[in-house]
Image: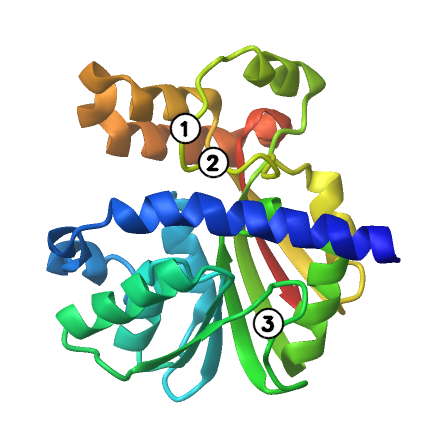
Amino acid sequence: MQSTLVDKQVWERAEIERSVSEAAHTPDAQLRADGANVSRYLNPPATTVYPLEYCYALLGNIAGKTVLDFGCGSGENSLLLARRGARVIGVDISDSLIRVAIRRLALNGLDGRAQFIVGSAHDLPIHTGSVDLVLGIAILHHLDLKATTREIHRVLKPGGRAIFQEPVRDLRVVRFARKLIPYHAPDVSPFERPLTTKELQTFSAPFRRHTIRAFSLPFVNITQVVPALRKHIHRAYRLDGAIIKRLPAVEPLTGIRVLEVVK
C-alpha cells in the first residue's frame, strides 16, 4: 500500500511538472474563445462524426446541473460547460493550469461561473454523491484507473453519468509502431499512455451500464499532422464516420473512444 501511494505521488508530480510548460505557453490571446467554435458544442447532434462534439451531445441539457470538469487543465471545457448553463466544478492537479482556467473564463465574460479546485483525481476533493455529470477529455490515460473509477463512482449521484474521450491503441502492432516513433512532445508526461478498450471496460465495471463509441481511423491522424492535408480534415472526419458506421470490424484500428458510464 505504501509503495502504491509513493507511485501515485511520483505520477502526480510528473503531471504537475508537465503542466508548467503548458501554462507558460498559453498567452491571453489564445484564451479568448472563438464564437464559431464555441457554437459547435452548444447543441451538437448525437450523429456527429467528431468525438468531442459527441461528448457534448451525450451531456444533454445541463442547465443548472452540477458538472465536474475532471482534469480541467486550462479550462477549455469548463468554459463550454459554463456557456451551457452548468454549475461547473473544475478539478486539476496543477495549480498553474487552474490559474490559466480562471483567467480564461474571466477573459470570456464568465468570471465566477465555475469553481476551480486544485486536487488529485485519485482522491477528489468533492463530496460523495454531489455531482450530476462528469466530463473528462483525454484524462484517464494519465491516471491509475482503479483509483479513478472508485472516485468517479463515489462523487456521482445515483443515476449520474460520466463521459470520457480517450486515446486507445487496441492492436499490438499499432502500439509497437507508435513506440518506434522518436518524437516526444515536451508537454507529455512519462506516465501517460494510450489505453485499450478492455481497460475502459474494466474501468466501467462498477457502473450500472456503459457505452463505447469508436472514432479516428489512422488516416484522420495523418490528415491532422501533415500540413498539406490539414485543409481536408473535415472531409477526413466525415469519411471516418461513414467507414466505421458501415464496417464496425475496423474499430480495432481506430485511435479514440468516447465512453459513457451510468451509476
- Tell whether 125 sits left or right of 244: right
Q: Amino acid at mark 3?
A: Arg
**Which residue is the site of mark 1?**
185
For the point 56% across and 10% down, which residue is it?
180
* Secondary structure of the residue carrying numbered label 1: loop
Mark 2, other Cα within 10 Å: few <14 / some 14–19 / many ≥20: some
**Which residue is the site of mark 3?**
161
**41 over 51 or under it: above or below:** below
Q: Amino acid at mark 2?
A: Val
* Secondary structure of the residue carrying numbered label 2: loop
Q: Give how far apart the Cα atoms at labels 2 and 1 are.
A: 6 Å
Disc 2 and disc 1 in contact, CB within 8 angstroms: yes
Disc 3 and disc 2 in contact, CB within 8 angstroms: no
Q: Which mark sits nearer the N-terminus, 3 or 2?
A: 3
**Which residue is the site of mark 2?**
188
Q: Give how far apart the Cα atoms at labels 3 and 1 are.
A: 33 Å
Q: Considering the image in quadrants, where does the N terminus appear?
A: bottom right
Residue 137 appears in the figure: yes
Q: Which mark sits nearer the N-terminus, 3 or 1?
A: 3
* Residue 219 image-quadrant placement: top left
Q: Position of residue 7 (x, y in %)?
A: 74, 48
* Residue 236 image-quadrant placement: top left
